[in-house]
Image: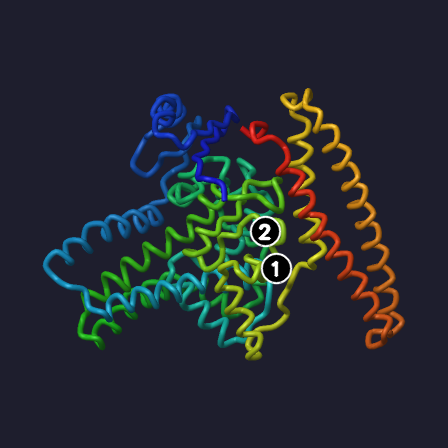
Amino acid sequence: MNPPRVLFSLQFGKIDHVLPNSCASLAQNWDKVLDHFQFDSPFDMNLASPEKAPINWPAAITLWSTLFSALILIPLYAYSNEFSTAAWVSFVVLAGLNGISITAGYHRLWSHRAYSAHPVVRFVLLMFGTMAVQNSVYIWASGHRRHHRHVDHIDNDPYSAKRGFWFSHMGWMVREYSTNKEDFSNIPDLLEDRMLAFQHKHYTALALGINFGLPFLIGYLCGDVWGVVLLGGLLRLVWSHHTTFFINSLAHIWGRRPYTDANSARDNGVLALFTFGEGYHNYHHIFQYDYRNGIRWYQFDPTKWLIRSLAWCGLAGDLKRVPNFKIEKARLDMQFKRAEQGLSCKKLAALESIEHLKVTLAREYESFSAALQEWAKVKEEQIHAAREAFEHSEVMKTYHARIAAIESGLKAQRKRVAALVNQIPKGVWA
């Protein structure tokens, strides 16, 4: 995994300043960075612009008041009181329910329609998603679909990472930018859902009721009202907010891009630990309709595990998966791109081994092109065979075997190309 870097992009000058990790270099360049920022108010550290959008007071008050209240009230209470086990358990359980309801519900179910769910599951995800206080599904999903359609676009992506860490983390919410205007033209499928319509219409009452009522009730039953309200109520809300926000900010500047570099999204296993698997963001942005984010068995993606478990119980269905061939193709595309970039470096022109590597790369690419053509041919034959009602015959098994063999060949080739990239002198990537 690549080490974290801080990327500041100037909206109007379109200049990128990448600050190295060393504190000395950061100190030397900090003044230059600050020259490009305006600190007009505590609500905005956004990139310099000729006209500031008005403050979105409800969002600003909610986000800042909960954050500062948690920073002040919880230490003050802990100074003279001891939090009960029930208070800590309420924080863990409610934070988990909020987080998984955003990832499995707001995100993968409603924004991307990556699977379908039983009404009981949808109701539970909707209620605890409401408790996370991230707006109604209508607003959340419509904005998220715009984000995917216009990812990284300065003007059209609601939380474009190209406008800086602060903007993509929460700055886009505390001002009334034009990209935040309600436009539900991209969610016609959701507008037909009466459960979502009810939530949108009564969102404020529902959010206030469940956020004040549930922690108070748990605290009353456990004999620790203040402890549960502070941990299971206040701290849980702040935690839920910022772990989600990190996907819009950190997951676009820190991590690897094994599947595509067409956008700023990164795969980050560390973020996945705190976001129920959402950290594998590079994969998600190229294959957004897959119900999985972490596709390897060892990748931490509890949202995927929940959806799959619900499917086993008959409570979810229509799980969408990207074919292995497309995944391997995307990874190979990136491997070839990195190899070509490395071998084209002028620093390597005088090295005798480079010509051999170039020949090897050309040969691998020819093999790659042949595999693509073979796969397309087999898929076409398979579709034709299915139309002829051979689904349960030995013919279909043959097609499946041929496709599996092509996928296996691509996986082996990806490893060979990765080995070729590793042979390129390290100084090239500096």
In the picture, measured across the screen, residue 366 lies left or right of residue 271, that is right
State the residue at coordinates (44%, 39%). Answer: 4
Q: Nearer the viewer, residue 290 or 402?
A: 402
Query: Which residue is farthest bottom?
Result: 313
Q: CA distance from mark 1 to mark 2?
A: 9 Å
Q: Nearer the viewer, residue 93 or 45?
A: 93
**Which disc, if any, is residue 98?**
none
State the residue at coordinates (59%, 43%). Answer: 150
Identify the secondary structure beneath mark 2: helix
- The amino acid at mark 1 is Asp
Front: mark 1 or 2: 2
- The amino acid at mark 2 is Tyr
Q: Quadrant of residue 102?
A: bottom left
Image x and y of residue 33, in percent: 39, 25
State the residue at coordinates (38%, 60%). Answer: 132
In the picture, measured across the screen, residue 170 lies left or right of residue 390, that is left
Q: Which residue is mark 1?
A: 290
State the residue at coordinates (41%, 44%). Answer: 169
Image x and y of residue 367, in percent: 80, 45
Q: Tell me which label, 1 or 2, sits earlier in the chain.
A: 2
**Which disc, if any, is residue 283?**
2
Q: Residues within 10 Å of mark 2 (few under 14, many from 20)?
A: many
Kindly check if marks 1 and 2 are in contact, taking CB atoms under 8 A apart as contact.
yes
